């Protein structure tokens, strides 16, 4: 099961959160974004309960203000990107 996690982080604490996420085997990708939120991660775990447990743990990181979780319901073959 895959989920997209959108993070709001305390200003200046991005590196601390990035380090914790980089060390987490469930985190497949991390994207630093501009706009209302700070990071988007793709988390891959075997079942819903594991996603929930991961989310509870991630929310306990001291510099995390808020996380939005979006569960992936289906995967469509990626489109080819133009070069």
Image (spheres, rainbow, N blue to C red):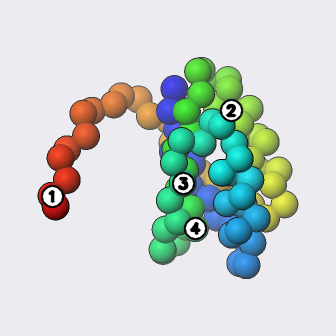
**Which residue matches tag 1?**
82
Q: Which mark is residue 38?
A: 4
**Which residue matches tag 3?**
30
Q: Is residue 82 left or right of residue 2?
A: left
Residue visible at 70% across and 68% down in the picture? 15
Residue 56 in picture, x, y percent from top left = 76, 40
Q: Is residue 78 left or right of residue 56?
A: left
Q: Nearer the viewer, mark 1 or mark 4?
A: 1
Q: Nearer the viewer, mark 2 or mark 3?
A: 3
- Pointer 1: residues within 10 angstroms few (<14), some, or many (20+)? few
SS for dot 2: helix
Residue visible at 67% across and 60% down in the picture? 18
Residue visible at 51% across and 48% down in the picture? 29
**Label 1 – label 3 distance at C-alpha:** 22 Å
Q: Nearer the viewer, mark 4 or mark 3?
A: 3
Q: Nearer the viewer, mark 4 or mark 2?
A: 4
Residue 23 in picture, x, y percent from top left = 71, 47
Residue 73 in picture, x, y percent from top left = 41, 29
- Nearest the viewer among 12 and 8 is 12
- Tell me whether circle 1 and circle 3 mark residues in contact (CB < 8 Å): no
- Pointer 4: residues within 10 angstroms few (<14), some, or many (20+)? some
- Tell me whether circle 4 and circle 2 mark residues in contact (CB < 8 Å): no
Residue 65 at least partly seen: no
* Label whose residue precedes the other's in the sequence (1 or 3): 3
- Tell me whether circle 2 and circle 3 mark residues in contact (CB < 8 Å): no
**Which residue matches tag 2?**
52
């Amino acid at each position: 099961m895959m989920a997209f996690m959108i993070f709001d982080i305390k200003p200046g604490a991005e590196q601390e959160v990035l380090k914790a996420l980089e060390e987490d085997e469930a985190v497949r990708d991390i994207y630093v974004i501009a706009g209302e939120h700070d990071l988007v991660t793709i988390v891959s775990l075997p079942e819903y309960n594991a996603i929930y447990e991961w989310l509870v743990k991630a929310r306990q990181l001291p510099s995390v203000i808020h996380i939005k979780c979006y569960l992936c319901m289906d995967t469509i073959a990626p489109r080819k990107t133009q070069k």
